[in-house]
Structures are given as C-alpha cells and as structure tokens.
Amino acid sequence: MSADLRVSIGSLTLNNPVLVASGTFGYGEEFAPYFDLSVLGGVVTKTITLEPRAGNPPPRIAETAAGMLNSIGLANVGVEVFVREKLPALQRYSTAIIVNIAGRSADEFKAVLRRLEECDLRIDGYELNYSCPNVKEGGMAFSARPDVAYEVTVALRKETTRPLIAKLTPNVTRIGEIARAVAEAGADAVSAINTLVGMAVDHRTRTPKLATVVGGLSGPAIKPVALAKVWEIKNAVSIPIIGVGGIQNYEDVLEFMLVGASAVQVGTANFVTPDCAARIVRDLESYCDREGIDRLADLVGRLNVEC
C-alpha cells in the first residue's frame, strides 16, 4: 500500500507537498511537454499584476557558484490576459492552482484579486507576493514591516474566502514578526523564503552582471538560510508554512518538513531539470515505502533538537 502523501494548507488539501515556485514555472503549460502536471501538489503561477509589465531591462539573469541571480521585475501578461489565455489551460490538470498576485499598492492588490474572483475558472488559492526584491515600487516593502503586512492582508482577507498564502522576504531582521502579523490578519499560510538580495560582478569589464546592479539570489546557496527562516516562523505562528529555497531533491523536502514546513516549492531547480518536481514526488513515494512511513504529513515539525 502506497503512503499517504497528502498535506493540508488551511482548508486546501494537496495531493502531495511538492509545488513549483512562482516565477520559475511560467504559467504552467510551458512545462507540460516534460511531464504530467497533475502529479504535482500544486502549481504556483507567475506573478500577476493588474496591468501587463515588461519587467526590468536585460541582462536579468546571472549564474553564481551555487545558485542564480535574477532581476526579472515581475514581467507578466496582466490579469486580463491571464484570465483569458493562461488560466483556462491549467484547468485540465488535477493539481492545485495557486495564483501569485502583486500590486504597487494595497488597492492594486485588491483590484487583481477582485478580477480573479469574478472569473468562473478554478483557483484553489492565492499567494500574495509581498516580497519581490526586484521592483522599485512596493515589493519587499509589503513584508518588511509587520504593520504594513497586517493592513494589506486584512484588506485582501475581506475580498475572498479562498486560501491566502503570504510570501515573505528573508531580507528582514525578524521574519517571525512578519509571519505573526499576517497570521493575525487572516492569512491561511505563509511561504518562505523569497530570494535574498545579491550581486554579481564581471571583473574584466568592471561592471555588474545585472542591469539593475543587484537582484534576487536563489538556488542551493540559500537553502540553509531558508531552513533557518522556516524554523523561526514555525516557532512564531501556528499556521502552515510552505518552504522555499534551494530544494533540488526529496532529501531537501524531508529537511524542510522536519523543520516545520507542511509543503515546499521547487524553484531554481526547474531551470536545470524541467521534470525535477515530478521526480521528487516519485522519490518521496519510494522513500515512504522504503522507510515504512504511512503518512508523510506526520514528519512535519518532528525535528529533534534535544542533542
């Protein structure tokens, strides 16, 4: 008998704890040629804003020794095209659809959410992008201060009964305080972490490798930071946590679950191995069979710190 891989994020039940992270998986359909998206716990779409955005000027990507720097700047098609062309294509898959949304202000966040609520297509939850470090307006400011994160979340909570997942920046002193604020404001879960502010330099040309000079660092380099931030959040709030940061294989998933994450998102690894998330799901099944684990969710928060 196969293990039960299902996990709960508030009222939302995922078939397994493996999601793909916003901004690393397009609108979902781009990865359909590589594997059946229905095997995933969920797809978190590319960030959607009220109007289309061209994003930051190139170069917007730079490879580092253990990860990647990006400064995409929330380039996206805007909510109208998303509802008309992108969201319908995802309906055929039996995986959770989490729409990542952002705005320059609380009012713009609300306008995007309202438009999505009006459509009659399946949406299983929203991830609130409070933490993108690559845009000049808003972005990280929404999760850099507890009072601001609280106010925006309260406003959005009034607009929907669907699960709200606040994505938090690690670029703060105490991420637990921000998590506590959004939990008190009505968020159903938090996802952590977004990218760390980083920089890469070409010593030959004496120029930065990104047009924006600094960008967001992701990949294996940030996994230890992400684990520590998930641990801090776990000790601050009781709502579910979705761990993000450098996850490449099933062992990484287990580590995040032991620290306190109920689910995870695979990000940068999608660029290296397009079917990485599907492979991780298979490996988790094999692990549970091998270890005699009946219910994967039982591992959440089971880190032994008495050593």
Image (cartoon, rainbow, N blue to C red):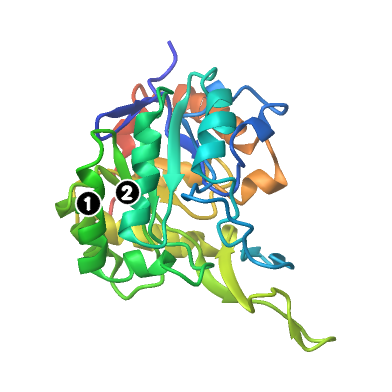
Element under label 1?
A: helix
Q: Which residue is mark 2?
A: 110
Q: Amino acid at mark 2?
A: Lys
**Within 10 Å of the Cα at label 1, are there few (<14), some (14-19), or many (20+) other Cα atoms?**
some
Q: CA distance from mark 1 to mark 2?
A: 7 Å
State left or right for residue 116 relative to residue 180.
right
**The disc label shown at residue 57, or none:** none
Looking at the image, tell me whether mark 1 or mark 2 is earlier in sequence order: 2
- Residue farthest toward the top in the current orientation of the protein: 1
In the rendered image, which quarter contains the N terminus? top left
How many numbered marks does the figure carry?
A: 2
Q: Which residue is mark 1?
A: 155
Q: Is residue 94 above or below residue 19?
A: above
Give how far across and how far down residue 278 sits, in percent. Answer: 59, 30
Tag 2, which secondary structure? helix
Q: Residue 6: horizontal and vertical position, in percent?
A: 37, 25
Dots 1, 2 in contact, CB < 8 A:
yes
